[in-house]
Amino acid sequence: MKKLFSVSSSVFDELKKIANSKSSKEVEKHLENLLEMISTHPFFLNSLSLVLNTQSLSKLMMNQTLEKIWKSLQLPNKKDQEKTLYLIHELQFKIHQLEKELKQQQLATQLKNTVKIKPLSSHESSDNSLNNIRPKKSASNVTNLV
């Protein structure tokens, strides 16, 4: 306790020196001494450590609580969103590939349909070949045969 009072009295002494300083160099020198005393004092360091630890623990608790809330609401987190975006991109790529293949198949069938000549059916081809071989009936042929 005695040490605390000795430090506080020296702090007050430095504050008095700062107030009585005539030049800016003296003010800087006394201010530097004052900050050195405060920043190296164990009471200040313990207090600062306590504040930092409390702050970090409260932030950790807040983060954990928010994470539990998000999970209970079943809202997607960043990892879920990235995974979903990746799957959407894959689906878009597959759709694009399928559309490309479909277009190529349509062009191929259109090309076949335009180039394709309608073939004669087997019935039509036999009738035509017989007609070409048989002599045509006329009135003169009928009279010669009778």
Image (cartoon, rainbow, N blue to C red):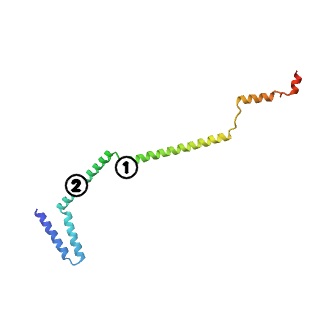
Query: Considering depth in this image, is 49 or 133 the residue closer to the camera?
Result: 133
Q: Distance between the residues labelled 2 and 1?
A: 28 Å
Q: How crowded is mark 2: few (under 14 residues within 10 Å), some or many (20 or more)?
A: few
At x 49%, y 46%, the residue is: 92
The quarter of the picture where the C terminus appears is top right
Q: In this view, does 118 lie to the left or right of 34?
A: right
At x 14%, y 67%, the residue is: 8
Q: Is residue 92 left or right of residue 65?
A: right
Q: Residues within 10 Å of mark 1 (few under 14, many from 20)?
A: few
Tell me where residue 108 appears, x and y as whole percent: 62, 41
Vertical side of 115 occupied by 138: above or below: above
Q: What residue type is labelled 2?
A: Thr
Query: Considering depth in this image, is 54 or 132 the residue closer to the camera?
Result: 132
Tag shown at residue 137? none
Query: Considering depth in this image, is 89 or 40 the residue closer to the camera?
Result: 89
Q: What residue type is labelled 1?
A: Lys
Q: Is residue 94 left or right of residue 26?
A: right
Secondary structure under the numbered disc 1 in the rendered image:
helix
Please name the residue that numbered disc 2 is placed on: 54
Whether label 2 touches label 1, CB < 8 Å: no
Please name the residue that numbered disc 1 is placed on: 78
Secondary structure under the numbered disc 2 in the rendered image:
helix
The quarter of the picture where the N terminus appears is bottom left
**Which callout, 2 or 1, points at the residue further toward the start of the chain?**
2
